[in-house]
Amino acid sequence: MKDVARMILEKGMIIGEDIFNYQNELIIPKDTEVDEKVIKKLERHSIICVPVKEEIDFATTHFEKVRLSKEFQTFQLTYNNCMPIYAKIMNGFVSTGIWKSTSQLKDIYVKITGCARTGEALLDYLYNMLPREDSMTHAHCLNSALIAGVFGTWWGLSGEDTMQLIQCGFFYDIGKLKLPQDLLWKSEKLTDVEYTKLKTHTMLGFDLLKDQPEISEPIIKATLMHHERCDGSGYPSKLRGGKIDVFAKYIAVIDAYEAMTSARTYRQPLNPFQVIENFEREGYEKYDKDILQPILYHLAATQLGFMVRLSNDDEAKIKAINKDNLSRPLLERADGSLFNLATKPDLTITAIF
């Protein structure tokens, strides 16, 4: 909402609050559309300034409200200013094979994260970003580095390890810059030949990083192993559990989370409970449970108190989180009655607001 002088009110604006005259009598109720009669009435009662609704006041979901906020606008501007700098740095590295820009990456990280008051706000802002098609690979890695700072805190990592994880985020998919973009972002299912070629990005990245003096071992291993899975179903070496470097395990979760929460040409970003449900469906076999669980719990817990819309169009408030079924919380209806979404397998959360 914003206050607008009566003299510059425009027809079609919506009054944001009940307006009273100097005798405390209601003269214009909230949600009234401004027309000539409203303006004349305000003039008769000598009302100088009135509150009117802004676009954000008409937003229905949590993420719509975030997208329309002034804080997000500042974040978006900073992010978009930093993106071409990041892309130029990484493209230059791929073409020359010489890395000397670690301090520049840190500066980019500090500038962007400085626009978010909390880690939760940063995740909300990233959820609302719409990368250009010509920068999607770069956006995937930049976003992963930003997410790494939040998740590193949730994992209770030291400052040094969190910074190491952030650096892993910047680099781990760099091998994709050596592959055709139409292969990387193809909306249809890849053929077996295409998928085999896509999987080479881990080795391409490893070969690029392995002899760089400024690149640490955890970054190199995360680049090579971030598609390995604890059940041995990953690539390139089908490693299991303890054979996978811990930073690669962290990045595996970050990589999957970023992919699910970013817009694609063929789908909208998934909301937090849809992300959690996807991880729960197969995650505890493929990902390290001790690494995955804290992230899923934090994602669920940050939604407490929000309203949700269900697949049957009912609306309810998130009252409590089910620790054994994080994607299906305890909900409270408008009449105060509670129901457990875990007992309603036919229902899903389609929106959060």
Image: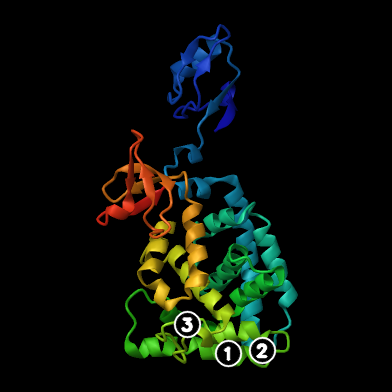
Numbered disc 2: secondary structure: helix
Whichever of callouts 1 and 3 sits on the residue coming sooner in the sequence is 1
Residue appearing at x 74%, y 82% in the figure: 100
The label number, if any, that marks residue 206 in the structure image: 1
Q: Earlier in the sequence, mark 2 or mark 1?
A: 2
Mark seen at residue 227:
3
Q: Residues within 10 Å of mark 2 (few under 14, many from 20)?
A: few
Quadrant placement of the N terminus: top right
Disc 2 designates what residue?
Answer: 96
Of labels 3 and 2, the one closer to you: 3
> Which residue does the image show at 53% across and 55% down from the upper left?
124
Amino acid type indicated by mark 1: Phe
Front label number (2 vs 1): 1
- Write the residue at 52% across / 71% down: 291
* Image x and y of residue 161, in percent: 67, 73
| Quadrant of the rendering where the C terminus is positioned | top left
Looking at this view, is 18 or 307 the one in front? 307
